[in-house]
Amino acid sequence: MKETDYYATGRRKESVARVWLAPGSGRFEVNKRELMAYFRRPTLEMIVRQPFVVTNTLDRYDVKATVKGGGLSGQAGAMVLGISRALVKSDEELRRPLREAGFLTRDPREKERKKYGQPGARKRFQFSKR
């Protein structure tokens, strides 16, 4: 990590994303693969790029990230939080647009635990009167 790099961590559901921003041309590397090769869905790619679109910094930084845990959607959400936090470290002026877009808020929703005597968290076995 160089002096000009900015590091931040993002989390969502079971996913954790470690994100490094470096001045560059807008390249994305996720787990040593290109962004589209890793996420495979245009919607997830768009979600990951949103902090840069909101702050008009799309081609100013290269992103290197390692993500683990959860599914692709949770990993994309974790990357958004990590990228947003790193952008704020690079330039404090970007805090307001990122906050207004909701990218600096950790999504607190987690999977509800399975309850004993039942097939799932909310589902119940079929009731039989007789």
Image (cartoon, grey):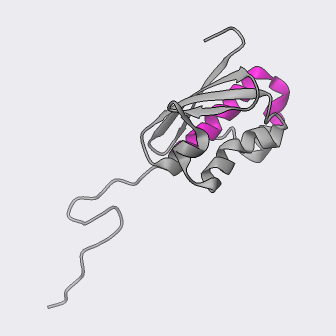
The location of residue 93, given as percent across then percent down, is: 85, 27
Q: Quadrant of the C terminus?
A: bottom left
Vertical placement of residue 18 versus 77, above or below: above
Q: Nearer the viewer, residue 84 or 129?
A: 84
Q: Residue furthest left?
A: 130
Majority SS type along the magenta span: helix
Indicate left or right for 107 with 119 as reference.
right
* Residue 34 drawn in magenta: no
Indicate left or right for 111 with 83 as reference.
left
Q: Quadrant of the N terminus?
A: top right
Residue range of the region highlighted in magenta in the rendering: 75-96
The location of residue 34, given as percent across then percent down, is: 58, 37
In the rendered image, which quarter is residue 68 located in? top left
Indicate left or right for 122 with 66 as reference.
left
The location of residue 69, given as percent across then percent down, is: 42, 40
Q: Give the residue drawn at x 43%, y 45%.
A: 70
Q: Is residue 38 visible?
A: yes
Q: Give the residue drawn at x 70%, y 34%.
A: 84
- Give the total of numbered labels: 0
Q: Nearer the viewer, residue 78 or 72?
A: 72
The location of residue 59, given as percent across then percent down, is: 80, 32
Q: Residue furthest bottom?
A: 130
Vertical placement of residue 23 versus 26, above or below: above
Vertical placement of residue 10 versus 115, above or below: above
Indicate left or right for 53 with 3 as reference.
right
Q: Give the residue drawn at x 24%, y 75%.
A: 125
* Residue 82 drawn in magenta: yes
Q: Is residue 108 visible?
A: no
Vertical placement of residue 73 versus 83, above or below: below
